[in-house]
Image (tube, grey):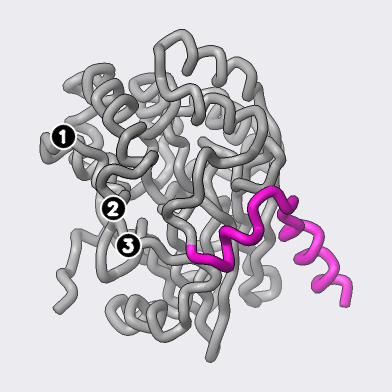
């Protein structure tokens, strides 16, 4: 039995939509993405965050206030959920005793101590899911999966696992977060799209981070992935100054994750291989 979480219905949306995930307390990445959205003339009401505003980096309070003031649509990630509940861990489903679990005992308490009561109160107002109609399709925004906010779903995750979330939500399109990697998987007229995250690189050996654009040109649904760089050295220096895990701080510069504990074998094999989703989408569009 899958619980029915609090879902906010956005009605019918139109025009370009910008989707991104996991700011992870990285204010510099957020600032750059907003500049991109402004250049693209995409209003806040057509921008969606898939959760985990708070995370590994050094400015959780500033990041929450930035997203709040920006006025975009966002859902709770597992990090927000556990902060609201007063839990003592991030709820990321890390293996107990692993490196991710060990590092979370530093960055999660830092985030909790840094966030203001006002910010936590605002986070508690965020829905767990969003739903809307777009280009004739039913869209659901969730963090991990319908089966659990911290369930990891990757490109290599078998389609029947993804089908469970489609069945639970009734969606044609699922916009998901949590996994940290951008990807698209499609089947039988259904789309599982993960924009990736902007707070950390995608383990591809580059410092780039990712977002997703949806379009409804001539009433047809389409999507493109896009990468960008930002002032990652500032974010790195702030992590070091606040004694946050150095391995994660280095990831901002190198694009390599400290470890691949959460990844299936297929995604582990891609570490250090530059992602070309943006090029591939453009090539398909030409064809």
Q: Give the residue drawn at x 39%, y 61%.
A: 152
The one of 33 and 94 positioned closer to us in this rendering: 94
- Number of residues whose C-alpha sits closer than 10 Å to that of mark 3, classed few (under 14), some (14–19) or many (20 or more): some
Q: CA distance from mark 3 to mark 2?
A: 8 Å
The secondary structure type at the circle numbered 3 is loop
| Residue 99, image quadrant | top left
Q: Position of residue 169 (x, y in %)?
A: 31, 76
Front in this rendered view, residue 100 or 52:
100
Query: Can I make out residue 54 in this image?
Result: yes
Q: Foreground residue, 112 or 287?
A: 112
**Mark 3–mark 2 CB contact (< 8 Å):** yes
Q: Is residue 247 shown in magenta?
A: no
Label 1 with label 2: CB-CB less than 8 Å: no
Q: Residue at x 28, y 79 (%)?
A: 168
- For residue 168, above or below residue 85: below
Residue pictured at 76% horizontal, 66% vertical: 281
Q: Residue beneath label 3, please?
A: 151
Residue stretch rendered in magenta on the structure = 264-287
Which secondary structure, mark 1? loop
Q: Nearer the viewer, residue 243 or 120?
A: 243
| Coordinates of residue 170 in the picture (x, y in percent) | 34, 81
Q: CA distance from mark 1 to mark 2?
A: 13 Å
Disc assigned to residue 88: 1
Q: Is residue 241 left or right of residue 14?
A: left
Tag 3–tag 1 contact (CB < 8 Å): no
Please tell me in which quadrant of the rendered image residue 208 appears. Answer: top right
Mark 2, other Cα within 10 Å: few <14 / some 14–19 / many ≥20: some
Identify the residue under disc 2: 93
Residue extending furthest top?
Answer: 241
Residue 13: % across, % down: 48, 62
């Amino acid at each position: 039995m899958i619980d029915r979480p609090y879902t906010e219905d956005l009605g019918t949306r139109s025009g370009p939509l910008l989707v991104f995930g996991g700011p992870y307390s990285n204010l510099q990445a957020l600032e750059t993405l907003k500049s991109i959205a402004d250049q693209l003339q995409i209003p806040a009401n057509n921008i969606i965050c898939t959760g985990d505003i708070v995370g590994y980096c050094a400015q959780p309070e500033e990041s929450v206030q930035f997203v709040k003031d920006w006025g975009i649509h966002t859902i709770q990630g597992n990090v927000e959920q556990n902060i609201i509940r007063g839990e003592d861990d991030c709820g990321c489903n890390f293996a107990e005793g692993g490196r991710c679990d060990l590092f979370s005992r530093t960055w999660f308490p830092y985030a909790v101590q840094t966030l203001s009561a006002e910010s936590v109160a605002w986070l508690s107002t965020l829905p767990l899911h969003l739903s809307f109609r777009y280009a004739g399709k039913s869209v659901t925004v969730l963090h991990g999966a319908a089966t659990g906010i911290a369930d990891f779903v990757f490109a290599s995750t078998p389609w029947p696992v993804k089908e469970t979330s489609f069945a639970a939500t009734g969606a044609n399109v699922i916009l998901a977060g949590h996994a940290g990697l951008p990807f698209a998987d499609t089947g039988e007229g259904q789309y599982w799209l993960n924009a990736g995250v902007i707070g950390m690189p995608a383990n591809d050996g580059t410092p780039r981070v990712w977002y997703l654009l949806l379009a409804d040109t001539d009433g047809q649904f389409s999507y493109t992935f896009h990468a960008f760089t930002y002032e990652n050295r500032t974010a790195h220096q702030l992590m070091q100054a606040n004694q946050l895990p150095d391995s994660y701080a280095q990831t901002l510069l190198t694009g390599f994750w400290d470890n691949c504990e959460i990844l299936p074998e297929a995604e582990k094999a891609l570490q250090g291989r530059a992602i070309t989703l943006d090029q591939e989408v453009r090539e398909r569009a030409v064809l």
